[in-house]
Image (cartoon, rainbow, N blue to C red):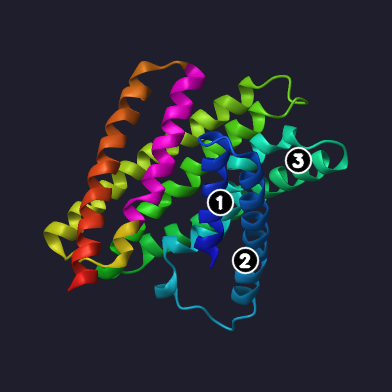
Amino acid sequence: METIAIALLVLSADYLLILKNLTLAKAFWLIGMSLTIFFAFLIPYLMFIQERIDIKNVTPAWFIPPVGLIVIPLSGGALINTFSGIWREVTMFINYFAWGAGFFLYLALSAIVMHRFIAHEPLPCGIAPAIWINLGPIGAGTSTLYMLVKNSEFITMKEPFLAFGLIFWGFDVWWFVMAIILTLHYIRKLDLPYSLAWWAFIFPLGAYVSATHNVALAFKINIIDSFGFALYWLLFALWLITGIKTLKNTAF
């Protein structure tokens, strides 16, 4: 259900930024935002009341609740100035609450996931693509931070926020290279059988492609733009391969 909520937020951004349909964009955002915030409290609550959680159950999929919160400003940031009066203030409050909560939840969970990677056995082969989920929070976080800053009139000095986004994006370069190295390790030394977990290659990398484009536009750095273009074609290739394998396994 959490992923459905995130999908609604992405649809909201599509309808707003591409199709220019404000009514549907607001509708999808309100539904997706409400569901995302609900699950952002429900899932940690269920974890907190557990007597014990096996470290083997810790995977990058744990980042989904904070990612959902971070994605709220993707269209929510652009929607701020479409409201007026108290509703504009409420929308601004929701967007900044969501980004801040999502960012710090990601930092907390990142330490737990890193501990699992370092101190325990590798992820099972069937869910190895989940390694790529590490790209998602940073990629989405960079893009949505820029969206918020762009649409916040009270932020007169935007450069510090843009610079932080560049540094945040830089951490994802490390995760991108590490994800490739670990994926090759599974292919050569272990196994990487097809499963629906392969779709973890797609959304996180897509978020990083978008972030790379936004960083390149903000700082007008051509090499970052070229890097993003290469990432786009890698994303397309992975999407094509995963889509074909999904169709084959669904049909047969």
Between 180 and 251, the one lying in front of the other is 251
Which badge, 1 or 3, comes first in the chain's sequence? 3
Given the image, on which type of amino acid does mark 3 rest? Met
Q: Amino acid at mark 1?
A: Leu
Give above or below for 29 relative to 164.
below
Residue lying farthest to the right in this orientation:
86
Residue at coordinates 66% horizontally, 51% vertically from top-left?
27
Would you name the residue on which mark 1 appears?
A: 107
Per the rendered image, the range of residues in magenta is: 200-219
From the viewer's perspective, is residue 107 above or below residue 113? above
Amino acid at the residue labelled 2: Phe
Residue 181 left/right relative to 75? left
The answer to which of 20 and 49 lies nearer the viewer is 20
Q: Label 3 near label 1: C-beta < 8 Å?
A: no
N-terminal of the pair, mark 1 or mark 2, is 2
Residue 53: x percent and y percent? 51, 78
Q: Quadrant of residue 175?
A: top left
- Judging by the rendered image, the residue that carries numbered circle 2 is 39
- Residue 89: horizontal and vertical position, in percent? 82, 40
Q: Horizontally, is 94 left or right of 170 in the view? A: right
Q: CA distance from mark 1 to mark 3?
A: 23 Å
Residue, disc 3? 92
Residue 211: within the magenta?
yes
Q: CA distance from mark 3 to mark 2?
A: 20 Å
